[in-house]
Image: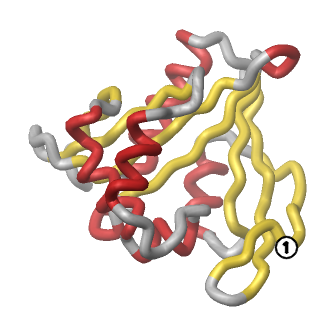
Amino acid sequence: MVEATIRAFEMSDWEAVAELWLLPNCQINTLQMPYESRDAIKKKLENPPPRQHSLVATVNNSRKVVGIVDLQVFDGRRSHAGELGMCVHDDYQNQGIGSKLMEAAINLAQRWLNLKRLELIVYCDNAAAICLYEKHGFALEGTLRKYAFRDGVYTDAYLMARLAN
């Protein structure tokens, strides 16, 4: 286990986040596209959707970003809910980074944003992520058939959610 610190994303982190998004595990397990330019990634990070909160994980008291979680709060009649998306650097997986990011996102959602429902989508073959989400109280709600085209084939995904007490 490495010592991780969770903090808000800052634009000075954009290059490290671009590195995360271009890593093989992030591309295969998220909707990130391969060969995306750093300029395009920077533009996305400079213009986040309204009501998005982004947290990063750094290690060993440094500014080295090794993970990111985005919490997108919904509007209107769904303003009690939000969606999570997360990515951890390939070299730092299975070292507690994902758990730290998840704990921080859940804390932000429930104790500061008063969200009652958190949702996420995970590919059915991403066993490590599913285990992490279940560990943090997420439950399977359904299967999204042929959810995304990935590496030449359509792949299914699970919709998972966590309800606040």
In the picture provided, is 66 more to the left or to the right than 49?
left
Give the residue displayed 26% in from the left and 55% down from the top.
Answer: 1
| Residue 28 figure quarter | bottom right
Q: Secondary structure at mark 1?
A: strand
For mark 1, what is the residue?
A: 146
Give the residue displayed 76% in from the left and 77% down from the top.
Answer: 155
Looking at the rendered image, the quarter that the C terminus falls into is top right
| Residue 4 figure quarter | top left
Q: Nearer the viewer, residue 94 or 80?
A: 80
Pick out the residue farthest to the bottom: 152
In the picture provided, is 70 more to the left or to the right than 11?
right
Question: Which percent across, then down, holds residue 122?
Answer: 68, 59
Question: Which percent across, then down, holds residue 68?
Answer: 40, 45
Q: According to the image, what is the colour scheme of the structure?
A: secondary structure
Question: Which percent across, then down, holds residue 126?
Answer: 62, 70
Q: Is residue 133 visible?
A: yes
Q: Nearer the viewer, residue 1 or 51?
A: 51
Classify 10 Å Cα crowding around label 1: few (below 14), some (14-19), many (20 and above).
few
Give the residue displayed 19% in from the left and 46% down from the top.
Answer: 59
Give the residue displayed 78% in from the left and 59% down from the top.
Answer: 158
Q: Nearer the viewer, residue 135 or 142?
A: 142
Q: Is residue 165 visible?
A: no
Q: Name above or below for residue 102 compared with residue 41.
A: above
- Callout count: 1
Residue type, mark 1 in image: Lys
Question: Which percent across, then down, holds residue 98?
Answer: 43, 50
In the picture provided, is 110 more to the left or to the right than 6?
right
Q: Nearer the viewer, residue 46 or 143?
A: 46
